Image: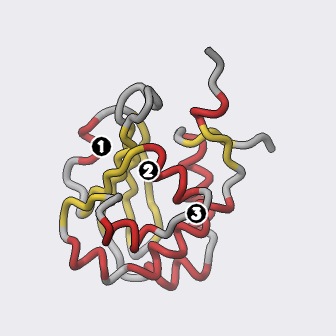
Amino acid sequence: MDALVFPSELWVADWTRRCNASAAYLTAARGWDGVVALEIGPEADYPPRPLYIQLCATDGQWSSYRFGPDPALAEHASFLLRAPYSTWKQVVRQQIAPLPTIIRGSIRVEGRLFELLTWTESLRVMTQLAGQVDTAFGDETRRD
């Protein structure tokens, strides 16, 4: 299988599939119902506009996802995590962990931060699983 471009719908599909197949993730996320959104902010002209990932969970399992440039994907999310592309790239590469990055303010959280903090183990496992996706980064693969 070829590497999947981050960010893209195919990348999100593989990531959510890995989460739903992970006993560690499902155990950590058990009981979570809601919507989480991520905003991937443009930086040095990539991506050309903000992109959004919307994840919907039922009892911790991702029941659906959406990806694209529509800011409406972030509406009604329990949490919206905002960061520039380079920060998300470091998260996927396992160079930084999301929780310390949130505390430092490099990933900004809108929504119920206290509730998010109760799900730190599922966040940690999700990040590990993101690092397992065979990833090609969009800014490194585009041709001018």
Q: Residue at x 57, y 57 (%)?
A: 92
Measured in 3D between alpha carbons, the distance from the residue under mark 2 to the one under mark 3, in whole angstroms, is 25 Å
Q: Is residue 50 above or below residue 99?
A: above
Q: Residue at x 58, y 63 (%)?
A: 95
Q: Position of residue 87 (x, y in %)?
A: 45, 52
Q: Residue at x 24, y 57 (%)?
A: 77
Give the quadrant of residue 15: bottom right
Q: Residue at x 61, y 66 (%)?
A: 129
Residue at image mark 2: 65
Disc 1 crowd, CA 10 A, few/some/many (<14, 14-19, 20+):
many
Q: In this image, 124 relative to 116: left or right?
A: right
Dot 2: element: strand
Q: Position of residue 19 (x, y in %)?
A: 57, 67
> Is the C-beta separation of discs 3 and 1 under 8 Å?
no
Measured in 3D between alpha carbons, the distance from the residue under mark 3 to the one under mark 1, in whole angstroms, is 27 Å
> Is the C-beta separation of discs 2 and 3 under 8 Å?
no
Residue type at numbered disc 1: Leu
Question: N-terminal of the two: label 3 or label 1?
Answer: 1
Give the quadrant of residue 113: bottom left
Residue at image mark 3: 95
Measured in 3D between alpha carbons, the distance from the residue under mark 1 to the one under mark 2, in whole angstroms, is 10 Å
Question: N-terminal of the two: label 2 or label 3?
Answer: 2
Q: Is residue 36 above or below residue 115?
A: above
Residue type at numbered disc 3: Gln
Q: Which of the numbered marks, if any, corresponds to residue 73?
A: 1
The outermost residue toward the top is 144
> Is the C-beta separation of discs 1 and 2 under 8 Å?
no
Question: N-terminal of the two: label 1 or label 2?
Answer: 2
Dot 3: element: loop
Please identify, in this view, whether the residue under mark 3 or under mark 1 is nearer the observer: 3
